[in-house]
Image (cartoon, rainbow, N blue to C red):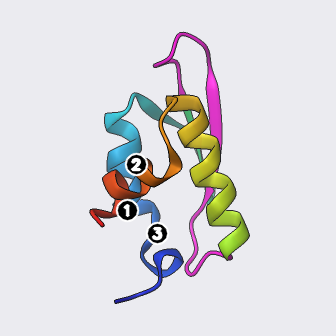
Amino acid sequence: MPKIQEIFRVGSSQNYLINNRYKVVRETASHLRLTSDFMGYSHHITIPDHCPLKVGTLNNILKDIAEYLKIPKEQLIEELFGK
């Protein structure tokens, strides 16, 4: 089984994030900027478009999204990666 940071790609995670009310507001050659108002206030996240991500970078992205959605990080991982 591939490491989690190797399968975290913008293409695979972007659909989940957009389904949770995130919108792509800016795209550069190496990053996507997503914004959400789903929880009643704005949340912005920048996702690198390269693979593999460093474990710390991936952890911070997942932690930030989970805190915003008020769900455990483990639940977010299951929803993103189908573990």
For the residues labelled 1 and 2, the Cα–Cα distance comes to: 20 Å
Write the start and end of the magenta stretch as one range.
36-54
Kindly check if marks 1 and 2 are in contact, taking CB atoms under 8 A apart as contact: no
| Residue located at (50% from left, 17% from top) | 39
Q: Secondary structure at mark 1?
A: helix
| Residue located at (63% from left, 58% from top) | 31
Question: Tag 2: residue type?
Answer: Gln
Tell me the quadrant of the picture where the N terminus can be found: bottom left
Which of the marked residues, 1 or 2, is nearer the chain's N terminus? 1
Q: Nearer the viewer, mark 1 or mark 2?
A: 2
- How many residues crowd around disc 2 within 10 Å: few (fewer than 14), some, or many (20 or more)? few
| Residue located at (57% from left, 81% from top) | 52
> Which residue position is annotated with label 1?
11
Q: Secondary structure at mark 3?
A: loop
> Which residue position is annotated with label 2?
75
- How many residues crowd around disc 1 within 10 Å: few (fewer than 14), some, or many (20 or more)? few
Q: Is residue 29 above or below residue 51?
A: above
Question: Which image quarter: residue 42?
Answer: top right
Question: Which image quarter: residue 55?
Answer: bottom right
Percent position of residue 37, x then y: 52, 18
Question: Tag 3: residue type?
Answer: Phe
- Per the image, is 53 magenta? yes
Closer to us: 35 or 8:
8
Percent position of residue 36, x then y: 52, 26
Question: Tag 1: residue type?
Answer: Gly
What secondary structure is the stretch in magenta mostly built from?
loop
| Picture disc at residue 8 | 3
- Per the image, is 63 magenta? no
